[in-house]
Amino acid sequence: MVDYLANTEINSQRIAAVESCFGASGQPLALPGRVLLGEGVLTKECRKKAKPRIFFLFNDILVYGSIVLNKRKYRSQHIIPLEEVTLELLPETLQAKNRWMIKTAKKSFVVSAASATERQEWINHIKECVQRQLLATGLQPSTEHAAPWIPDKATDICMRCTQTRFSALTRRHHCRKCGFVVCAECSRERFLLPRLSPKPLRVCSLCFRELAAQKRKEEAEELGTGSAGQPAYLAGAVCGASSGDDDDSDEDREGSGDGVWPSHVEFYSSGVSWSSFHS
């Protein structure tokens, strides 16, 4: 770990360069004691297709965003506290290699590196940072994680009813609980998932039944008996057709305008020495 870089001029320059690349749309990243450990491009599996994303590993957070202009501009900044992160290695296939899952309570997604060595470097550094953060905060490793969304291209039919075939007119939707690709009819219900959002979210029919049953059980245990009238788990729920706010956050929108990094272009123009990971 590079604690000796904390509060040094070179570390401040590196963090300032990252802030500059995100521009006014990004959150400030400089904090006392925060160290930028490394950066690189990883392929992130999004809903519609895999896309290159820039990732920055700090000693306490993981930051990523979409690439807009040749190593000089990014947008859609996402900041993940490392104490919330759990990593899971994924099996190799002919079509997908060097993959692993980054899991948190609010969002889980799959990324892949250019090589097995690069993947192992990322995993080793992230795990070390996570362990140090848990030790520093006194928190326990997270045991609840959001389900990763299955990519649209993984199926042409609804994964619940297995009858509805998707087309240009028949949209795919995602259950926020299990991540399955489902049709509108199989995902009409909404349920409050506090870890993910303050408002009820789209869930598939199976997850809705399971969540509702679990909620009824919890309420009955609290009251010592079953409750009459509308159960609390339905408060704020919406049953009906899909609404506009169901669309995929910014995962699809952030991809437009993604650029490519020419290998001959240097990341920093200030002459500051840079490598994938600092030591």
Image (cartoon, helix red, strand yellow):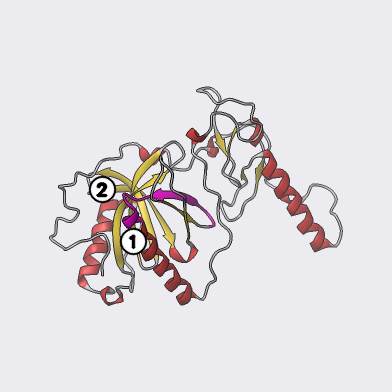
- The x and y percentages for residue 244 are 54, 35
- The x and y percentages for residue 258 are 30, 40
Q: Report the side of 88 relative to 269 (left or right).
A: right
Q: Residue at 78%, 50% (x, y): give it.
A: 231
Label placed on residue 121:
1
Magenta range is: 105-119
Say if the magenta span includes residue 210: no
Say which amino acid is labelled 1.
Glu
Label placed on residue 73:
2
Q: Report the side of 71 relative to 54 (left or right).
A: left
- The x and y percentages for residue 201 are 60, 44
**Mark in front: 2 vs 1:** 1
The quadrant holding residue 224 is bottom right
Q: Residue at 64%, 30% (x, y): give it.
A: 162
Q: Report the side of 102 relative to 211 (left or right).
A: left
Say which amino acid is labelled 2.
Lys
